[in-house]
Amino acid sequence: MPRRRWLSAVVLALVHVLGGVLAGLAFPAPAAAHDATTKAHAVVTGTGAHVRAVLDLEYDLLMKSAWLYAEAYEAKERTEQLRQLKINHAAVADYVTRRFAVAYGDKPCTPTTVGDADVRDRDKVAFAVVTLDYACEGDGAGRHAISSALFPDAESFVHSTETLVRYTLDGRTGSAVLSAGNPTLRIGERRASHQVGEFFLLGAEHLLSGLDHIFFLLALLIGARRLRDVVITASAFTVAHSITFLLAAMGIVDVPAEIVEPVIAVSIIAVAVANLLGREEAGWGKWRLPVVFAFGLMHGLGFASALDIDEGGSWGLLLSLLSFNIGIEVTQLAIIAVLFPLLVLVRRTSADRWVTVAMSVPIVAVSLYWFFDRIPLPL
């Protein structure tokens, strides 16, 4: 009796965890209320006295942080966003130049021009593209340093902001993650191990924050009956998404997000429906590996979009890419190690089929919502 009660508690815990996640999706916070975090992107290039930084910053957050009126930060159409950026150019330039800095040797570089901002989408979120030109003083023997304090916790709009930096400076090409605890990159001073650690954690964070990838993994686990199934399926998924992640992040393969994101939603639906139908009825046993591998290729493209490294031939960034991917893999294995033993225990009870249905149906419902939400509609 105690054992049966314990197994029932496990069943309820699994269903409640999924229910809590789905409740958060069903009743999301208003889009204007940033109770999560954001990532700023910076590409910094130059040599000696001349440096250029191109920043991608979440549009509405930038306009709020520059203390502009609701008319500016609530703009939704690209044309209106561009108009607001032009009207409020001085306020945006003041904010960005105070929060993002470049130095040469021990001397701060002077921002000389702030170009007209552009707007582009990142995963259906508008980002302002701001270009800064800096004039640096020095004798040519120094090194550049890049510092970011963009969107700090003190502004209360978001928390734990990270700035992903790509740079080609002082004859070096690389990447780094700047945060409140580590806000400055001095070119040539960081060890490779530090870079590995930064992007490993970034990969782990991306998987944990990417609910669609977790749903796909969960759907695979629900349908797996043996440890052998888990190992083979997870390996196929890992190999597939690692291939396309590296190819896309290096700029060798380019598939529009308008295609990738709906297909990722379809992949979750397909696996969850196979769980509902049963492996024999769905033919899942025969087609499991080819289907998982094919969908894994699409998930890899989704992982690559998090870094937005799309310059062909950027082989100097390979260490960052590999570290990011390893972070994803280790986190994926950790999720499997925690959830699969619990699912094994559930399958030893009479509630096995009920739990499969109770977990698969909400996954299908949410993924259908994602699918239709991600299809670009004509204006």
Image (spheres, grey):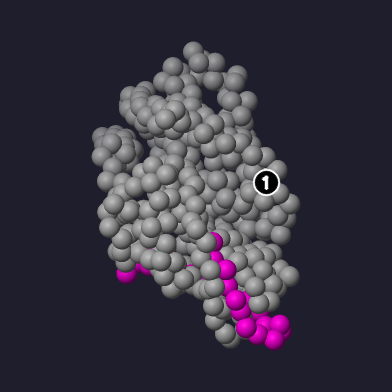
Front residue (pair 151, 223): 151
Q: Residue at x 44, y 28 (%)?
A: 378
Magenta residue check for 373: no
Residue, disc 1: 251
Stretch of the chain drawn in magenta: 131-154
Q: Residue at x 54, y 73 (%)?
A: 112
State whether residue 332 is above or below residue 293.
below
Looking at the rendered structure, the kind of residue marked 1 is Gly
State whether residue 272 is above or below residue 19.
above
Q: Is residue 203 something that shows in the picture?
A: yes
Whether residue 7 sits left or right of residue 267 in the image: it is: left
Q: Residue at x 54, y 41 (%)?
A: 302
Front residue (pair 224, 118): 118
The quadrant where residue 318 appears: bottom right
Q: Is residue 164 something that shows in the picture?
A: no
Q: Residue at x 31, y 49 (%)?
A: 74
Residue 8, given in percent of the width and then of the height, sits at 29, 35
Label 1 residue SS: loop
Residue 214, given in percent of the width and then of the height, sits at 45, 40
Residue 256, given in percent of the width and then of the height, sits at 57, 36
Front residue (pair 10, 111): 111
